[in-house]
Image (cartoon, helix red, strand yellow):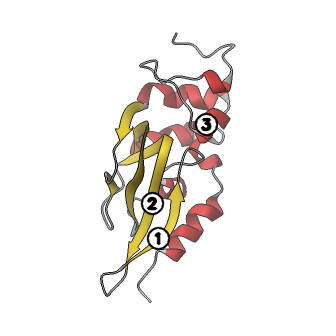
Amino acid sequence: MNSLRGAQPDQRTNGEGKHVANKVLLAMPDNEYELMRPDLTYIDLQHHLSLHEPTQKVEFVYFPNRGMVSQVVVTKDGRTVEVGVVGSEGYVGAGLAIGLSRSSVREIVQIAGDGFKMMGKRAARDASRADRGVQSTPRYTTASRAVASDDSG
């Protein structure tokens, strides 16, 4: 089933036929989802899996179907502070939507689940080719996370 014509958003699958339950992917218009679909790779999100470490280049965008990802900032004295959580209603790697290629946030799976990952550069490409795409996530959310995680002060 390579075409999405006539498919209900809650019946979407990736190119491998894996069921999509992520609300961001389900809410996308068909034309935007079709751009991303071939690049979505199914992934088990195991407990304590690190999806991103501070100051590393953001390589992947993750769309959890189930589970929870904790976003933490490491303070100057080495403590960690949780600044956000992402579940099936969102995605990890949101900074790419406003042009950020690095993040000071550590993103770790706190509740195991599953979902999809996609190369960040492909997500940015597809967003620019669509009218909204990944960029349809409110920019103020990403910007406020970037400000909240700035521990340079």
Q: How many neighbours does mark 1 have within 10 angstroms: few (below 14), some (14-19), or many (20 or more)?
A: some
Tell me the quarter of the picture where residue 80 sits: bottom left
Q: Are marks 2 and 1 in contact (CB under 8 Å)?
A: yes
Tag 3 residue: 130
Asked if 150 appears above or below 131 in the picture, the reply is below
Residue nearer the viewer, 112 or 138: 112
Horizontal and vertical percent for residue 143?
Answer: 57, 67
Could you tell me how far apart the alpha carbons at marks 2 and 3 are, in whole angstroms?
29 Å
Nearer-N-terminus badge (2/1): 2
Q: Amino acid at mark 3?
A: Ala
How many callouts does the rendering have?
A: 3
Tag 1 residue: 82
Horizontal and vertical percent for residue 20?
Answer: 54, 29
Could you tell me how far apart the alpha carbons at marks 2 and 1 are, in whole angstroms?
7 Å
Quarter of the figure with the C terminus: bottom left
Q: Amino acid at mark 1?
A: Glu
Tag 2 residue: 70
Nearer-N-terminus badge (2/3): 2
Q: Amino acid at mark 2?
A: Ser
